[in-house]
């Protein structure tokens, strides 16, 4: 191991490999593993944001570049083995709640992401970001993840053609044609791979379903394998910041802020414990810089043309393989750069191949529901409303609003006002404003 440290040279000095008891080889393996487990975003993000009317070719390039920049920020600014990319759930909220649900132009939605990103930066610099998360009951934080998981799963089922609209019952079972059957079998295949701990199981599943679709005549062959990345001109710097500053958009900005708060902090804490980056008091010394990198990545991503960029829980897979420093993130970022050359392959991937990936991600986001104490109805009932109303109202924002407000009302009516923190009162007020604006708009 000592020889490996000596060979590291600059890498050893910058990333303190010896101090973290790691080597260049271990960091490389960890970084590659992280990339394989999260590379599905290169297929899924263009598919979701493409439904908002954005150019899918440009979205592929922007997804790669946003992931590249965010991950390099984690590598060189925070010096941690974390990877960043446009976040799942947040991209769904962007497309299906804002653009399709509220009829906003995608340019305005990007402006909302930008404003929320600037807000993230201010909250992080002021040290408020963590305090906001800690002020919210754990049950509601867990419910937010579970609700988004259901929301994403519902979108996945729609993409598979398994669930379709019905004027009499709102939804019903769709026609089990070839694409749907391929998607269902693909979902089972992904679950099996993930159960067997196969690295990149979701990515492998997407590739296999696309190939099967080719043989079934549902997918056209790519004209080439490697090419110059599609231009980002159709979507880059097209955000409409002025429209996003309208009072009516407080609710979406509020939702982006809280979802990213929960997502980022939860992921950072989990991965930091895995990487042994926690001190004796349970504090994470680098959390400030990690949150700063996350915030800056969101602002840059919105300028390029994608929804909120966030820290990925898949980073834990690389950490489990030995990643301990930002050098691992350099390797992950390098693979995103290489992926830019393979746009012809990525852009042919059909919706029925990416939809099962959404369901799998939904399963992962839903699994912590067991930690919610439903026997304590002051927290259990609001948690349930948060979870169920996200998919049923097709809005993450609505789920959060009813969850927060119901928690305050139930605590007040049961004489348990002492459970409500000062910050939670402010959140409740913002939730009430959100509900009022939604009702009159």
Image: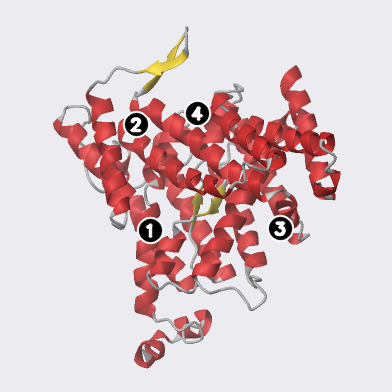
Q: Nearer the viewer, residue 124 or 151?
A: 151
Q: Is residue 52 above or below residue 239?
A: above
Number of other residues with Cα within 10 Å of mark 1, as a class: few under 14, some 14 to 19, many 20 or more? many
Going 34% across and 57% down the picture, which residue do you hit? 36
The residues bearing labels 2 and 3 have C-alpha atoms spaced at a distance of 37 Å
Left or right of 131, for residue 206: left
CB atoms of marks 2 and 3 within 8 Å: no
The residues bearing labels 1 and 4 have C-alpha atoms spaced at a distance of 26 Å
CB atoms of marks 4 and 2 within 8 Å: no
- For the residue labelled by badge 2, is the local secondary structure a helix, a strand or a loop? helix
Going 36% across and 60% down the picture, which residue do you hit? 335
Residue 441 visible in this rendered orientation of the protein? no
Which residue position is annotated with label 4? 52
The residues bearing labels 4 and 2 have C-alpha atoms spaced at a distance of 14 Å
The residues bearing labels 3 and 1 have C-alpha atoms spaced at a distance of 28 Å
Which residue position is annotated with label 3? 130
Q: Nearer the viewer, residue 144 or 374?
A: 374
Which residue position is annotated with label 1? 35
- For the residue labelled by badge 1, is the local secondary structure a helix, a strand or a loop? helix
Q: Is residue 11 above or below residue 191?
A: below
Going 67% across and 65% down the picture, which residue do you hit? 288
Which mark sits nearer the N-terminus, 1 or 4?
Answer: 1
Which mark sits nearer the N-terminus, 2 or 3?
Answer: 3
Which residue position is annotated with label 2? 351
Which of the 4 image quarters holds residue 22?
Answer: bottom left
The residues bearing labels 4 and 3 have C-alpha atoms spaced at a distance of 32 Å
């Amino acid at each position: 191991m000592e020889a490996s440290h000596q060979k590291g040279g600059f890498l050893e000095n910058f990333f303190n490999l010896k101090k973290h008891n790691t080597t260049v080889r271990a960091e490389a393996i960890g970084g590659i593993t992280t990339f394989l487990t999260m590379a599905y975003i290169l297929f899924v993000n263009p598919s979701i944001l493409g439904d908002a009317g954005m150019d899918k070719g440009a979205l592929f390039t922007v997804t790669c570049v946003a992931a590249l920049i965010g991950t390099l920020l984690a590598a060189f600014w925070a010096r941690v083995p974390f990877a960043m990319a446009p976040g799942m759930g947040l991209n769904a909220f962007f497309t299906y709640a804002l653009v399709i649900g509220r009829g906003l132009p995608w340019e305005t939605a990007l402006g909302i992401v930008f404003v929320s990103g600037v807000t993230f930066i201010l909250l992080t610099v002021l040290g408020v970001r963590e305090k906001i998360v800690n002020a919210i009951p754990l049950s509601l934080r867990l419910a937010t993840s579970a609700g988004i998981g259901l929301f994403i799963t519902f979108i996945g089922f729609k993409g598979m053609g398994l669930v379709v609209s019905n004027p009499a019952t709102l939804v019903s079972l769709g026609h089990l044609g070839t694409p749907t059957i391929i998607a269902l079998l693909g979902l089972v295949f992904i679950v099996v791979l993930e159960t067997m701990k196969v690295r990149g199981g979701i990515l492998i599943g997407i590739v296999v379903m696309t190939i099967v679709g080719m043989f079934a005549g549902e997918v056209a062959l790519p004209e080439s394998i490697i090419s110059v990345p599609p231009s980002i001109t159709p979507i880059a710097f097209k955000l409409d910041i002025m429209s996003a500053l309208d009072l009516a958009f407080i609710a979406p900005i509020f939702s982006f802020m809280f979802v990213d708060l929960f997502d980022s902090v939860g992921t950072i804490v989990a991965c930091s414990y895995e990487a042994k980056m926690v001190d004796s008091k349970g504090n994470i010394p680098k959390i400030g810089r990690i949150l700063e990198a996350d915030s800056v990545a969101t602002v840059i991503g919105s300028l390029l043309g994608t929804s909120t960029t966030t820290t990925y829980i898949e980073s834990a897979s690389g950490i489990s393989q030995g990643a301990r420093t930002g050098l691992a993130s350099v390797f992950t970022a390098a693979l995103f750069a290489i992926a830019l050359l393979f746009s012809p392959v990525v852009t042919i991937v059909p919706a029925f191949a990416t939809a099962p990936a959404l369901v799998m991600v939904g399963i992962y986001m839903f699994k912590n529901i067991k930690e919610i104490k439903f026997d304590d109805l002051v927290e259990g009932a609001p948690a349930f409303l948060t979870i169920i109303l996200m998919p049923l109202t097709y809005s993450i924002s609505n789920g959060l609003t009813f969850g927060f407000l119901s928690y305050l009302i139930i605590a007040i009516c049961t004489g348990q006002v002492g459970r409500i923190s000062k910050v939670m009162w402010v959140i409740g007020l913002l939730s009430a404003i959100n509900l009022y604006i939604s009702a009159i708009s």
